[in-house]
Image (tube, grey):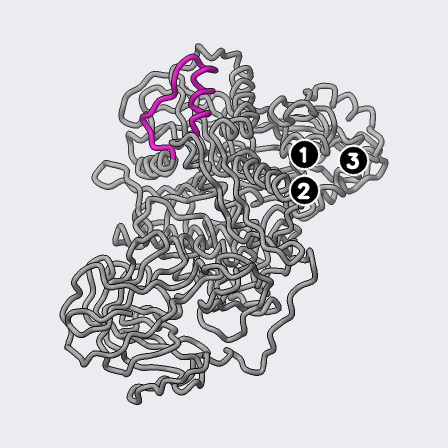
Amino acid sequence: MTESNQGAIGLVVKLPFATPEEFLAKYGANVSRGGIYLRSKTVKPPGTPVTLDLKLSTGARIIYASAVVEFITGQQGQGISGMGLRFLTLDPETKRFLETSVASLPHGQAMAPPVPPGVGAPDYTTPPTPTPQAPPPLVAAAPEPPPPAPAAQPEPPETPVPVAPAPEQAAPSAPAAPSPAQPTTAAPQATPPPVPPEPPTPAVPAPAPAAEAAPHRPSGSHAPVISANASTVPHAPAFEPPKEEPKREGPIIGIDLGTTNSCAGYVRSGKPEVLRSREGHNTVPSILALNVRGKMIVGHPAKGQMLTNPRQTVYGAKRLVGRAYDSPIVQHIKDRFHYEVAPGENGEAAVKLGDRVFSLQQISALILREVKEVAQNQIGQPISRAVITVPAYYNDNQRTAVREAGQLAGLYVERILNEPTAAALAYGYGRKLNQRILVYDLGGGTFDASVLELHDTVYEVISTGGDTFLGGIDFDNAIVEYLLEEFQKQTGKAFQGDRVAMQRIHDAAERAKCALSERSDMRIHVAFVTMIDNTPYDLDVTLTRKKLIELTEKLVDRTLEVCDEVLKAKNLATADIQEVVLVGGQSRFPLVHEKITQFFGKPPTKNVHPDEAVALGAALLAHSLGQKEGVTLIDVLPMAIGVGLPGGRFKHVMERNAPLPASKTYTLSTSRDQQTELEVSIFQGESDRTAENEFLGTMKLTGLPKRPRGEVRVTITFEVNSESLLKVTAKENVTGKEISSTFSTRDTPEAVKARLAQEQPPESQAAASSAAKGPHPSAMPPPEKKAGVVGWLKGLFGRR
């Protein structure tokens, strides 16, 4: 603290956070629109004027205000000592921050400084009595835990808390070193607004709230680091579905539901625009978290707690939505997420937050609700209708899951739209083009390539392909693996960090990847990242652009293999493509531009924004719905749909790249005398083996007439609408009776595949299977195309 020339105490606090969201995620309980509570070893009497200058670790200011001490806590060494400061005058940026980010907190609208939980009753009148001893422990009866055994890494706390209901978990630390969270006190940088003068008072240190940014701190750090007990599990609120069906009225928005970020678009006065988030960004992070108060937070506030509480923070849900928990893909990757992937009530992949399991449809719905509320705030009208985009290579289960998520978010989903098609709309709308283009969509978690023919207002997809496990996350993972290898080379020890440490490394890897788009090298320094044999270690590696290219070139080459296959599916050459449109944040990577230019013989177009094109295209389609002169979209089936045959074989019924909507029938007969039931397992994919395709569900037909084997024939009708959503019906041909049928996705995919593999193929079905095609080149990346599902997974992920 310093004393200003107007008699006020000048208090400059430097926080150990890089963003306001990180600060609020950790210490949101300490601030409201009307004031802030700060811990301090020594406090000032109520009524003392203060000029507060609160800064981030980057030096950026988030709060600059004249204030007055409203109350104090912890007098004479009892309780937690600190001051509640009531704001008097604010600078414009502070006012905006308090009215947007802070006001959304449960107590954020209060016009007085909050009293955080665990602090005790404040004193509004009595000045403190100085005491020479250090403040008492936060919970006096709780003993300090012993240091861990050598080479053991303590599990990170489940949730950080803003003030201190539990003692700090002690950890072994390095010799005395300056704490990164140590507060800074200095004179204010600008002349504060006038406040009532008070007699001079001696300056006292005032520690700032500090985040648990790293799992271990050097000794000598006296800033209060508060963490919850590892055994503490927050009580998560139950998901509340909408009480009534969404109304099909009012404005329609377009939503890009992305792996990393989501974005909303709206057409205003004939011009599409993106709708900004509460914090003023064009996108909303597709991240959901359970905070320390047991409240679900979405977007930037949730992203702010990824470093401190990764166990309760869900990201990348788009990769798992609509997949069975027991599927090989989910089992292979579930341990890569810092949160817990658990089985849902219907056997689908779900996540566990606190004490509850949430389906990924519910997680996606909460993200969509945030986007919906952002749109309502920007447009000024209730929003209940939307066009939502999905990767072109999504299967039927995944598309159905996204539509369900929209309904759970209180949205009437007018249409599910493929992302490349939406990007093509953003590129060509209103330009009266006659072109053949390829949309190269490399996002945070998925990759799609689609060839479209544009004829003024007609957008026809003629070929599509993709990989739902190829995106920016995989680029980050490649960097992380390199960093861990370098750590072992430098130290001679294998990395033994916990989830918090790994999340810090992932965060540093992502920032380095972005920085190397404009720089030739980047130092990646993560301090005190692990403790091995009671010795703290940093991760300190310089990554060059050349090395980054070496690490990620194979990933870019995989995208070009998909592009090549998509072209060959329609006998097209690269010369037949007039423009290449890049979409998705990872498409900014300079190596992508270089490889695209080499492959197609021309540089990609720069006519669309990679982050906003999909949302703008969805908004344009939403705007044109119901108009006489709207756009016409002709899409295609991204993957073949068919039935599983005995012996583990797959029969194509509807071929890939079939124009939509489409309908096709498939007839089968009974294989036993007096058979009254028939089971048909339906798959989607390009391989001739069911084990390498996606299981969609099982149709069970009952009530068949009792006849000799082969006399009862049943016609199965497959109908796929313009959104690539499947409807299956059945009819018995001998009597013409409608068959009682159910289509269930609850059967375990592996159980169905095992049954089919064990059954002997009847002659009629064996003959029918001769028309099945070979493996799809893009479904199983080389060199392990024929190695079965294990080889396929190895090709998909290439690591671990």
SS for callout 3:
helix
Q: Which residue is identified by label 1?
A: 793
Vertical arrangement, residue 603 with respect to residue 175, above or below: above
Task: Point out the stretch of residues depicted in magenta.
Answer: 589-610
Q: Quadrant of the C terminus?
A: top right
Vertical arrangement, residue 399 with respect to residue 207, above or below: above
Whole-percent x, y for residue 745 in the image: 65, 45
Q: Earlier in the sequence, mark 3 or mark 2?
A: 2
Q: Residue at position x 60%, y 24% from top? A: 778
Q: Which residue is identified by label 2?
A: 332
Residue 608 among magenta residues: yes
SS for callout 2:
helix
Q: Earlier in the sequence, mark 1 or mark 3?
A: 3
Marks 2,1: beta carbons within 8 A: yes
SS for callout 1:
helix
At label 1, which amino acid type do we have?
Answer: Leu
Q: Quadrant of the N terminus?
A: bottom left
| Nearer to me, 730 or 566 | 566
Whole-percent x, y for residue 466 in the image: 54, 29
Asked where in the image residue 47 lies, by quadrant, the reply is bottom left
Residue 756 is tagged as 3
Whole-percent x, y for residue 211 in the image: 45, 62
At label 3, which amino acid type do we have?
Answer: Leu
Crowding near the residue tagged with mark 2, few <14, some 14–19, many ≥20 C-alpha atoms within 10 Å: some
Crowding near the residue tagged with mark 3, few <14, some 14–19, many ≥20 C-alpha atoms within 10 Å: many
